[in-house]
Amino acid sequence: MRVPFPTARAATIDPYDIAAVAVQVLLGGHDGQIHELTGPEFLLPADQVSVLAKVLGRNLHCHGMTDAETREEMDRTMPTEYVDAFFNFYGDGVLDESHVHPTVRNITRHEPRTFEQWTRAHGHEFQGPTANVRTPS
């Protein structure tokens, strides 16, 4: 798998955990508060590809794209201002998403789901249109 910004770590959060926090916030008691949400661990893109490979039982490899490759690919699909922002955030290190915050646990009283747990719950979505096609015997 080709990945941009291969050295950018991120504490990826499961959308399930975002929803669980949102429910609690909407129930009240959080007026004026800003909650930083993260997953329970920070991972490099190569770590995420390794988890996908393990869970899916597939031979996947991570290829970190160069800045030039990343910019060329991004320039084809988004405005220059967005591309520049991504490079500012991840390339220059302005945005650091590697910090793990206890917010999900503190608000919901349950541990946030890991990237592996998310992958196991959604692994079927990575199988492709021919995953369930059987050849006649």
Image: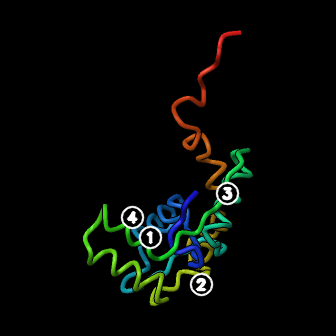
Q: Disc 4 or 2, which lies upstream in sequence?
A: 4
Give the mark nearest the N terminus, 1 or 2. 1
Q: Position of residue 123 (x, y in %)?
A: 62, 45
Instruction: Report how far apart the C-alphas of labels 4 and 2 lie in the structure.
Output: 28 Å
Answer whether labels 1 and 2 touch (C-beta < 8 Å). no
Identity of the residue drawn at 63% across and 52% down = 119
Nearer to the camera, 9 or 103? 9
What distance separates the C-alpha of mark 4 from that of mark 1? 5 Å
Q: Amino acid at mark 2?
A: His
Q: Is residue 105 left or right of residue 76?
A: right
Q: Earlier in the sequence, mark 3 or mark 4?
A: 3
Q: Which kind of residue does numbered mark 3 sit on?
A: His
Determine the secondary structure under disc 4: helix
Instruction: Pick the quarter of the image with the N terminus.
Output: bottom right
Q: Quadrant of the C terminus?
A: top right
Asked if residue 25 lies left or right of residue 83, the reply is right
* Residue 112, x across and y down, in percent: 63, 67
Which residue is disc 4 drawn over? 73
Rendered residue at 74%/52% (across/down): 54
Q: Give the quarter of the image for residue 12.
A: bottom right
Residue where numbered disc 2 is placed: 99
User: In the image, which disc is placed on residue 70?
Assistant: 1
